[in-house]
Each structure stands twice: as structure tokens, then as C-alpha cells.
Amino acid sequence: MAVDSAISSPLGPPACEKDAKALQFIEEMTRNADAVQERVLAEILCRNAQTEYLKRFELKGATDRETFKSRIPIITYEDLQPAIQRIANGDRSPILSAHPISEFLTSSGTSAGERKLMPTIQEELNRRQLLYSLLMPVMNLYVPGLDKGKGLYFLFVKSETRTPGGLLARPVLTSYYKSEHFKTRPYDPHNVYTSPNEAILCADSFQSMYSQMLCGLRERKQVLRLGAVFASGLLRAIRFLQLNWTQLANDIRAGTLNQRITDPAIKDCMAQILKPDPELADFVTEECSKDNWEGIISRIWPNTKYLDVIVTGAMAQYIPTLDYYSGGLPLACTMYASSECYFGLNLNPMCKPSEVSYTIMPNMAYFEFLPHEPNSAGLVPDSTRKLVDLADVEVGKDYELVITTYAGLYRYRVGDILRVTGFHNSAPQFHFVRRKNVLLSIDSDKTDEAELQKAIENATQLLREFNTSVVEYTSYADTKTIPGHYVIYWELLVKDPENSPSEDALNRCCLAMEESLNSVYRQGRVADNSIGPLEIRVVKNGTFEELMDYAISRGASINQYKVPRCVNFTPIMELLDSRVVSAHFSPALPHWTPERRR
């Protein structure tokens, strides 16, 4: 469909008139980022002026930034917990928001080890839907022809709970998938899924995954993109196929449905879809029965143009495994969002994972940024660090994200550390660095998630000669030994069992990790003797799947689940230790001199 050049976009030629309007909206918002932010803050403060929380700080009707910043404190979840508990218990007075709290969105069960309840209001669904509506118009600029096929996306809901006061508490994606915005979404040829709503909306993860995989196999030649929320979710789907391809092939051959699928809505839906297809069943059997699963995604879904998964932050460690199973297909990270707020989108979604930057959309909330100085932690109190507005951040600097939302979070610290990489018009673009305060510590050493990830990447270089990679990992600070030491659990993908890593190689991986850690750690090892040799414990294949199943059984969301990079919960430790097949220790001291302090 030809598009009038008058509504073309600086981002590129839109695929259709609907796309042109979406791209034009992005341009308008980002060209006037500061003015939009000023308007958003005024709207939030005006509508919520009579809330108990804001009245406490005597704004007296002021909606300007200066008054807001001088009166309203920067807060964390712990500061809000009493108010949130009152709402959860049934208090319907306007405590945080003038609009009624419609439900609570639960944060990931593995973010800081606690499921937080984030208040939301009905109209927030409109904002989330707006951001979703911008993703495909941007993607269509980079990948033409997506209207000629479908997307195989593994999407899941979590069974919700209710607070004592009767409000729903559920993950943000469950809220969205169960909303009319998703269930009755208008047909868009650029955004058609192979998975029927009935399969996505089934709370039983096996039945949901089985049905979605079956539909994806049936339409394998129409699939142009595969996706899940996180990279780990897509790898879990591939593992599911490895374990269940025999039953899936049987159902395809006979046009029947596995007896384990008992959900009435799925059964009715699949009855309309399934027809015997012996030729496809033979193909699935032939491909999946092979010992070598390298490139399996491209072999089964040969027209796939990219994988749509989050591979930033801690998810970066999945990239080699995704490359192995996909044959090196491009990885697209499209948006940046959390339970607290949806933030922005990637305007260059086909870039390399290491180059992913998200453009914050200034209409989503009011954004402030706390300068983050990793080398001066504890030396510069937060109270003396002035928050910076969205339009005033500086390229190359790191900031902690602070948000003020329509739903009643005011100057709330999200806990994400972002690095400014540039600007699109007047809106900054950020690289997600890490979650704040994910640390290993034995003595005065502090190792964060990004540093641990880098150490593991460096150590795994030693596994290349054995054609082996680390599929999953977690860690804990073992303080039962004297001195304490870091323990790293690895699950390995050994591609050639005849050439598996030697004992010596895995010992050297321990030392390589220590060489990669910060100078405070190395000083503790070498000079102070306050830290013992780092230990790697190799666990059986499938151990981290069991870890996820355990977390889900305790209420974690399958969509939001992320492997915890540091564990200290006894049942998890016991599960991991019961699956250890070998243990390895650093054979020498890492290098350290006072001059190398960082």
C-alpha cells in the first residue's frame, strides 16, 4: 500500500498509513520531550492533588517541577509498603491515586528476592497498549514482508491471586493478556500469532506450551519470527520440544490432541485446527530425532527472519545458546518495560545485542535520573546527588531510573542502572546496564551482576577448544568455609561428549573468573587472605529447569521469571547441590598489586 509522502517519517518509509501515524507520533513525542515531560508531571500532580500521600507534602496545588522536587522525597518500595498494604487490605480512600487502584502488578519473584505489589489504574492499560502499538511500525522499517506470515510467540499467563481486600495481584503481562486490549485486538496483518488466545490464556504451563508448540509446528512455513519475553523463555520452549516431540509428532500424524490437554477452551479451539498431516509428522520426527540440534530453529521454521527476545542485562549470557539453536539468526530487543511502568522502545531493533538502546517515550510517566557513580558507592550520599531531568542527561553517563506515574508512584527508584548512548531528537536513548545491588560479598568485596557476567564470559573462552558453552549459571557467597568463598553453579552444553572439558580446564576457568573480578576481591584473595579460592560446581543438565519449576510452584510468573544470579534460599541451595556432578577450585592466586586498584 502506497503511503503519502506528506506523512512519511524521518525514521524511514512506513509500510502503511497506520505505521506512518505511529512513526509520526514517535517523532512528535521525542522532538518535544521536555515539554511533554512538563505536561505529564502537571497532569499527575493536578489529578492526584487530593491524595493522602501528596497532601502530606503540602504542594498546595503547585504542579511545577521546582516545587515538586523541593517537596517530594525520593523513595524505595520499602517506603511505600505501609500504604500499599493498606490498599491491599481494602482501604479504598485516595491514598496514592485519585483514580481507583484497579489491581496490583507483581514484580518478578527474583528481583531482589521479593514479589512487590505495584498499584495500577485502569487507564494504564491504554498506555501499555500505546507502546505495544509502536513496536511493529518500527520493526517494519527494518524487516519487510512481515505481513506475509506469522509470529510464533510463546506467551503465558499466571493464575492470579487476590489481596485480603479483594484486589487482583498478578504479573503485568498476565494483566495485559487477559485484558480486552489483547483478547479483542484488531486484526493486523503485520502482527498475527500462530498461538490462539485460548492457548495463551491457559494457566497450566504444560497445556499452554504444548498447544502453542503444536500450532507453531503446524504452521512452520508461515512462521517469520519466533519470540518469548526473555531469552530464557525461548530456550525453555526448545527444551520442551526436545522432551515432547514424540507426542507432538503423534498428534500431528493423527490429527488428535494429547490426552494431557484437558482445558475445555483449548480442546474446542484445537478441534477446529487439527487435521492429520503424516508428511509434517515425518519431518518433525526426522529433525528432532537427530542427536545434533544445532540450528534446529532454522531447520524447523526455515523462513524465520529474527528472534524477538530480551537479551540485554543478565539475559546476555543466553546469546551463545540462542545462536547455537538458531544458526545465528538476528536477535531483536524491541521494548523496555517493568511492572512499575512501561518506559520505551528500541528504534533500531535489528542492532547487535551489545548495541541495544531504548528510547524513553516521554508520555509514559515523569522520568528523573539519579547520577550513578559505581566507584564512589557509599562515598556520595544519594541526598547530595541532584536528580537530572529526561532531556538533561549526558551521553556516556550512568543513571539510576526514578519515576513518577499516573498510578501513584512518586519519585520512585526502580533500581535499574542505565547508560546514556545518545538521543533521538530530544529524547535520550539508554543502554540497560544492570539491576542495582545484585551482589556477591564475602568481606569488603562487592561483585555486581554485570561484573559476574563478564567474569563468566572470560572464563568460558577456555571452554571453546572443547566446543562447550555455559547454558545457565547462578552463584552464592559461601560463608560457611573459613575464609568464605564464591561458589558458581554452571550448567554446561557439551556439544561433543567425546571431547568434554577436562578437570584442569575447569580449574583454570575458576582462576580466569578470579582474574576478571575487581581489585578489592583480588586483594582479599592475595593480600588479606579474607576470601578463599573460587569454586565452580557443574550441575546436571536440566537443573535450572527444575529451579524455574520450583520458583513457579511458589508463585513466580513464567513470563517474568529470570534465573537468580545470586541465591541464598536454603531449598534452592539444596536443589542445586543435589545436582552437582563435579566441583572445581581455582588452582592459584589471581594477580593483584596495589597499583591495579580500580
Image (cartoon, rainbow, N blue to C red):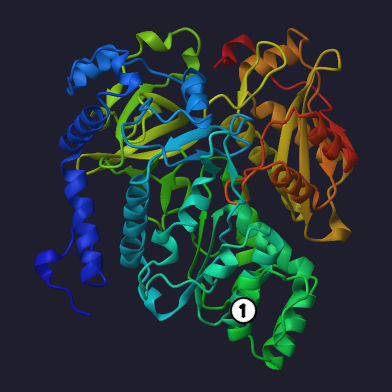
430 horizontally vs 71: left or right: right
Q: Position of residue 416 (x, y in %)?
A: 46, 31
Location of residue 260 (image quadrant): bottom right
Q: Position of residue 537 (x, y in %)?
A: 83, 37
Residue corresponding to mark 1: 268
Query: Tag count in the figure?
Result: 1
- Rendered view: 273 above or below 490: below
Which residue is located at x 53 percent, y 62 percent?
A: 227
Q: Position of residue 342 (x, y in %)?
A: 39, 43
Front-most of residues 303 and 555: 555
104 horizontally vs 578: left or right: left
- Secondary element under disc 1, as helix, strand or loop, is helix
204 horizontally vs 31: left or right: right
Which residue is located at x 86 percent, y 34 percent?
A: 574
Which residue is located at x 40 percent, y 80 percent?
A: 148
Location of residue 276 (image quadrant): bottom right
* Res. 50 visible in picture: yes
Quarter of the image where the N terminus is located? bottom left
- Disc 1 residue type (three-letter): Asp
Q: Position of residue 405 (x, y in %)?
A: 34, 33
Location of residue 51 (image quadrant): top left
Which residue is located at x 45 percent, y 79 percent?
A: 149
Quarter of the image where the C terminus is located? top right
415 horizontally vs 274: left or right: left
**Among all residues in the image, which is located at the extreme left?**
6
- Rendered view: 65 above or below 214: above
